[in-house]
Structures are given as structure tokens and as C-alpha cells.
Image (tube, rainbow, N blue to C red):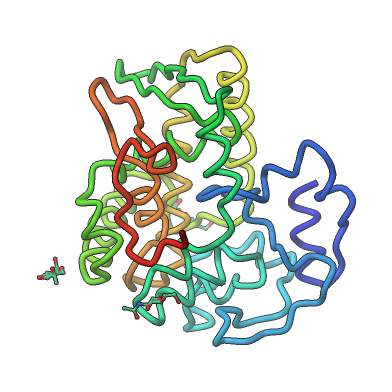
Amino acid sequence: MVLRWLLLVGLGVAEDEEVASGQNCHLLQTGLGFRKHLPLEHGTSIVADKEKGICRSHLSEQDWFTPIGQLTEAYGEDGWCIFGALGGWTAECAVSRRSHNISNFLAQPETGYMTYVSEPQATPYTLKLFDDRSLTIRDHFYPLDDLYCFVNGWYSLDRAATVQNFTYLEEVSEESCKHLAKIVPGYQNITLNDFDKESRSDEALLEALAREGGGFVSEEVVNGMRLHAATKCLLRGGDRGAVCDLASCAERGCLGPNNEVLYTARGECESVWKDRPQ
Ligand SMILES: *[C@@H]1O[C@H](CO)[C@@H](O)[C@H](O)[C@H]1NC(C)=O
Ligand SMILES: *[C@@H]1O[C@H](CO)[C@@H](O)[C@H](O)[C@H]1NC(C)=O
Ligand SMILES: *[C@@H]1O[C@H](CO)[C@@H](O)[C@H](O)[C@H]1NC(C)=O
């Protein structure tokens, strides 16, 4: 459904009801993942506007199945902008990369996330990773974000520098991406379709663990977090600049004792985003 909807949005046609209805709502509201970054512009036709981070109004089915690296090379453009029509998560990242100011990306609507990790239902539960590490989180709605930030080491950066110093953000992005290019199998061939499949299956497994109050995370799911990150790296095109998700992770939270995620939204760690709307 999500794939089809995304493709239709590229054509300026959206299945509003399906996406806007009930259980899918929360997917539109939070920070870093994929499905929740479906375009908020649904129902309107998208007009290419580079200033707004949207380089093309039309995304074809072929784009979905073509290696991202090939696409960015062919267009010679910022991959985030090439896919700007997919939604704020791509368009705002493109704008942030151009202006060297991560605020645009961080300012995407995240009221949902801010609220739901602060609610009484946001009880902690522990993920036991296949490699004997554990991670305790409170996100029951889109738990992929926490595992994603953790597995990629993005909860362990200099938080203030990552959000406030774009040069630093580019440097740490470069390190992460070089590493991922080495360890993710078939890195050069990753497509948006691979990313979509990964996001959906990993998130479904993690949501099941959230319902069960925690549990085992397989090597496959951990590798999924790396594929997820590798996709964001490939969208840079070549070795160009920042991956916005690093900054999102840095602002979202920090790691406490025993790998417990502490959340900025809960006041458990300090916000490092100076322009954060009050
Ligand atoms: C970054 O963007 C935000 C929001 O558009 C703006 O308030 C802030 O002044 C900008 N910061 C810099 C250093 O330009
Ligand atoms: C920003 O980061 C760069 C690269 O790490 C560093 O050289 C520079 O001193 C930093 N700037 C500030 C103002 O901290
Ligand atoms: C990418 O795909 C090409 C063509 O299908 C194949 O020859 C190549 O081995 C693949 N590369 C990786 C890293 O999987």
C-alpha cells in the first residue's frame, strides 16, 4: 500500500483516505523513519521547486527500482532533492543541505513524537540484540528510530556539534557512510524499493516487540538498520555532505547507563537545537 501510494503521489494522485485513516495516522507524525515521512502534500499535485528542495515533480516507477547511486549520478543533483517530492523527510533535508542549516529538517512536524514518548503509556522495554547488546527504549509507535540511531552509533556523537556545526555533521556523515559502503552488501545497488521493503518489515517486527514488552532482535534486523542508513548515504550522491538523520538522532535523545535511551522530549537530556520552536 505504501509503495503504491508513494508512486501515485509522484503522479499527483493520492489515496488520501487510506493513509489518513486511523492506525496509519501516527506514521505521519514522527522523526526519522520512512513511512511516517509520507508527503504531507498528499492530494495536491507536486510542483518542482528547487528552493523548496523538490527538483522533480514526477517520480516514475523505474526510479523506484533503479540503484540510487545510478540515479544521483545521472541527474548530477542532490539525491534528496531528486526525491524531494516524496515528502518533508527528503525535501527538507535537501534544503538543509543547501543552506548548511539543519533547522529546516529538524522542524518537520514531530509533535506526535514529542507527545507520545512523554505519555504515561510510554513505558520502557528492552530490545536484546543478537550480539548481546541491549537497548532500552520508550517509543512504542515507531521503535525503528531508536534502534536505527543506536545501531549506527548516532546516539553516541557530540550532540551539540552534530546539530549546530554543519561542518562537523558533514565529517561524521562521511565517516559513517564510508563505513557503511564497506559493510552493507550490494551497497552500490540499493534501490528505494529495497529501502521500502526493509523499513516495512523491520518496523513490523519492532512494533510486535513493543507490544510484547521487548524481546530479541535478530542480526537481520540489525543489518536492516545499516541498509536504512546506507540508503540515506546514497541519497547524498557521491561523497557529498551531510546525512540529516544524524542530527535528528542527536537532538532526539542520548544514551544513559545500560544503553537506556533518554529523550529530549521528556527532558531527560538537553536539547541541542538552538532554534527549537518553543
Ligand atoms: C537556520 O534556520 C532557522 C529556521 O529557518 C533560522 O531561524 C535560523 O536563524 C537559521 N540559522 C542560521 C545560522 O542561519
Ligand atoms: C566545527 O567543526 C569543525 C570540524 O570538526 C571544526 O574544525 C570547527 O572548529 C568547528 N567549529 C566550531 C565553531 O566549533
Ligand atoms: C550490482 O549489480 C550489478 C548488476 O546487476 C552486479 O554485477 C554487481 O555485482 C552488483 N554489485 C553489488 C555490490 O552487489
The residue drawn where x is 64% and y is 65% is 87
* 214 lies above or below 203: above
The residue drawn where x is 68% and y is 57% is 38
The residue lying furthest to the front in this view is: 278
Name the spot of residue 274 as percent of width and height, x first.
32, 64
Name the spot of residue 57 as percent of width and height, x first.
71, 80
The residue drawn where x is 38% and y is 67% is 275
Name the spot of residue 213 as percent of width and height, x first.
54, 13
The residue drawn where x is 51% and y is 36% is 144
Decide if residue 268 is on the left or right side of residue 139: left
Decide if residue 204 is on the left or right side of residue 60: left
Residue 194 appears in the rendering: no
Quick one: 276 or 14, which is closer to the camera?
A: 276
- The image quarter containing residue 126 is top left
Residue 117 appears in the rendering: yes
Name the spot of residue 111 as percent of width and height, x first.
58, 50
* 39 lies above or below 220: below
Quick one: 278 or 179, which is closer to the camera?
A: 278
Decide if residue 129 is on the left or right side of residue 259: right
Decide if residue 164 is on the left or right side of residue 95: left
- The image quarter containing residue 15 is bottom right
Q: How many marks?
A: 0
